Image: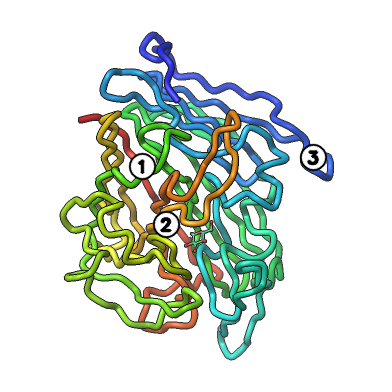
């Protein structure tokens, strides 16, 4: 939650410590990155999970603003709702886990809601959140960084092509967590990478995020069916509870989505910036801590997910209930491989997939 040692830390630090063994005995490390202001992020090379992210509040005290667990066994276990991890190969859903490239149909592992919904969610049964990444710590002019690499083999979870993935986290000296995604393939495939951090800008475990004020730079969204699969339509947010073009409290209109399949916000916003260049996508402010998070991305979409199904114990045994955190998952739209009118997620040999998302922290 909060602690007072931050402001005295002046040097950029990267530390590596043993975090735990996976079920099959692989040792996992935790990397602690501290920037010149004393902001700190901890990342493990299992799932590339951001386990802690400490940023200053309006009084200069550090707060840990991401939800998570204390142990590897919990991140590896069945109750992990994708806390802080890298999501791949395909973030969000692909209908029936099926898509076609060049006349060949590929069938993916369908894992959504334990198979009750016949879709692939977040990469399949064993997505990138559950794999061991090779970690390379780096001191860069921008701040301390951790490069993570993973080679996803041809056929993994049903996806074609050997996919060579590099994700670089940098804790910049202006208090931003920058995430750069790079991937190449040796066969045509589809790729959609994101990070699934659950934020609570009052501090993790401090209650719900309904009072956070949110702004999203999106005039449109992608409506979905009862299985949360896009209908293919691009619809205006105007006149709906999805209109966040001016800041609104997250809780103000959330009741409109109280019923399943939503139980809160779980929507893909079509960002106004469709250029592929970095631009502001969203801004969130927590009233008590004064912590503001700005999200910049090269991606065309962002999933707002408000922790609708949370009901578990997290760090320090703290209870995380419904709406204990929110995610802003920058992404291509759900089920893009089956919607030719959506920006393409196809990656071919010789091309380089490149996306950048920045979560920048300040106070007001
Ligand atoms: C999805 C939700 C899903 C959640 C799982 C989000 O990215 O949009 O539908 O329940 O991840 O943690």
Q: Residue at x 41, y 32 (%)?
A: 203
Quadrant, the C terminus? top left
Closer to the N terminus: mark 2 or mark 3? 3
Q: CA distance from mark 3 to mark 1?
A: 31 Å
The spot of residue 345 in percent (x, y) is 46, 71
Rendering coords of residue 214 (x, y %): 26, 49
Q: Position of residue 240 (x, y in %)?
A: 23, 69
Label 3, secondary structure: give it: loop
Residue 250 numbered tag? none
Q: CA distance from mark 2 to mark 3?
A: 32 Å
Q: Secondary structure at mark 1?
A: strand
138 over 227 or under it: above or below? above
Q: Left or right: where does residue 240 sit relative to residue 7?
A: left
Which picture quadrant has residue 115?
bottom right
Asked if ligand 1 lies within 8 A of label 2, the reply is yes
| Residue bearing mark 1 | 359
Left or right: 53, with 57 as reference point: right
Q: Write down the residue under mark 2.
A: 305
Neighbours of disc 2 within 10 Å: few (<14), some (14-19), many (20+): many
* Residue at numbered disc 3: 26
């Amino acid at each position: 939650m909060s602690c007072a040692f931050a402001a005295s830390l002046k040097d950029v630090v990267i530390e590596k410590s043993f975090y735990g063994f996976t079920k099959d005995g692989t040792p996992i490390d935790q990397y602690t990155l501290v920037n010149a202001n004393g902001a700190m992020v901890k990342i493990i090379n299992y799932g590339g999970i951001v386990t802690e992210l400490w940023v200053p509040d309006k009084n200069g005290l550090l707060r840990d603003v991401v939800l998570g667990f204390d142990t590897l066994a919990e991140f590896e276990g069945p109750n992990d709702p994708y806390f802080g991890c890298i999501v791949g190969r395909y973030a969000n859903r692909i209908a029936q886990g099926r898509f076609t490239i060049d006349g060949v149909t590929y069938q993916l592992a369908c894992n959504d809601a334990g198979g009750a919904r016949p879709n692939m969610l977040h990469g399949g049964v064993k997505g990138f959140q559950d794999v061991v990444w090779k970690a390379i710590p780096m001191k860069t002019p921008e701040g301390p960084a951790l490069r993570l690499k993973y080679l996803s083999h041809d056929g993994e979870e049903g996806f074609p092509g050997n996919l060579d993935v590099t994700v670089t986290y940098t804790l910049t000296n202006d208090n931003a967590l920058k995430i750069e995604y790079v991937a190449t393939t040796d066969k045509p495939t589809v790729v959609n990478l994101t990070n699934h951090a659950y934020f609570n800008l009052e501090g993790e475990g401090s209650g719900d995020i309904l009072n956070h004020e949110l702004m999203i730079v999106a005039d449109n969204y992608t409506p979905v069916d009862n299985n949360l699969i896009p209908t293919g339509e691009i619809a205006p947010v105007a006149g709906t509870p999805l209109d966040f073009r001016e800041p609104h409290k997250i809780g103000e209109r959330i009741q409109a989505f109280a019923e399943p399949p939503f139980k809160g916000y779980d929507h893909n916003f079509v960002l106004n910036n469709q250029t592929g260049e970095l631009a502001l996508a969203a801004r969130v402010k927590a009233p008590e801590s004064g912590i503001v998070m700005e999200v910049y991305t090269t991606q065309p979409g962002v999933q707002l997910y408000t922790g609708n199904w949370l009901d578990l114990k997290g760090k320090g045994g703290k209870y995380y209930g419904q709406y204990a955190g929110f995610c802003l998952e920058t992404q291509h739209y759900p089920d893009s491989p089956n919607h030719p009118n959506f920006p393409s997620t196809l990656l071919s040999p010789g091309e380089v997939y490149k996306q950048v998302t920045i979560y920048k922290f300040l106070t007001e």
